[in-house]
Image (tube, helix red, strand yellow):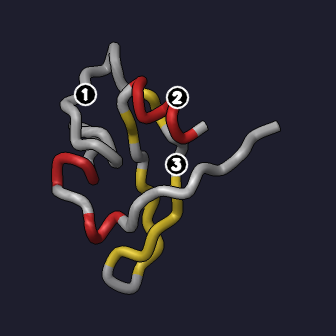
């Protein structure tokens, strides 16, 4: 079963959080080895649909499962 986790509004996140360099919840710095991919999300980007690929840290992943 694949459950979709609610995420913060991308517009409220920093650019580093939006691009996956920091956790979407706690802003911890992420590397490819520590990040947990939260799956692609469809968002509105200035009136156009776009895919967003949010990531989080292991601690927040455990807390939000």
Residue at 59%, 50% (x, y): give it. 5
Q: Earlier in the sequence, mark 1 or mark 3?
A: 1
Label 1 or label 3, whichever lies nearer to me, is: 1
- The percent coordinates of residue 10 (x first, y second) are 34, 64
Label 1 or label 2, whichever lies nearer to me, is: 2
Residue lying furthest bottom: 47
Residue at 46%, 68% (x, y): give it. 43
Dot 2 lies on which element? helix
Say how many tags the image has. Answer: 3
Residue lying furthest top: 33
Q: Earlier in the sequence, mark 1 or mark 2?
A: 1
The quarter holding residue 14 reads bottom left
The quarter holding residue 12 reads bottom left
Dot 1 lies on which element? loop
Separation of marks 1 and 3 at Cα, in angstroms: 17 Å
- The percent coordinates of residue 50 (x first, y second) are 43, 65
Separation of marks 3 and 2 at Cα, in angstroms: 19 Å
Label 3 or label 2, whichever lies nearer to me, is: 2
Q: Identify residue for label 3.
A: 40
- Whether 29 is drawn above or below 50: the answer is above
Residue at 55%, 57% (x, y): give it. 6
Q: Which image quadrant: the C terminus?
A: top right
Residue at 22%, 42% (x, y): give it. 27
Q: Which image quadrant: the N terminus?
A: top right
Q: Identify residue for label 1.
A: 30
- The percent coordinates of residue 25 (x first, y second) are 34, 47
Q: Identify residue for label 2.
A: 62
Residue lying furthest front: 63
């Amino acid at each position: 079963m694949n459950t979709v986790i609610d995420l913060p509004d991308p517009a409220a996140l920093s650019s580093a959080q939006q691009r996956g360099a920091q956790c979407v919840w706690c802003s911890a710095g992420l590397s490819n080895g520590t990040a947990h991919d939260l799956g692609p999300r469809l968002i509105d980007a200035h009136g156009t649909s776009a895919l967003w690929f949010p990531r989080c840290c292991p601690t927040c992943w455990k807390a939000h499962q």
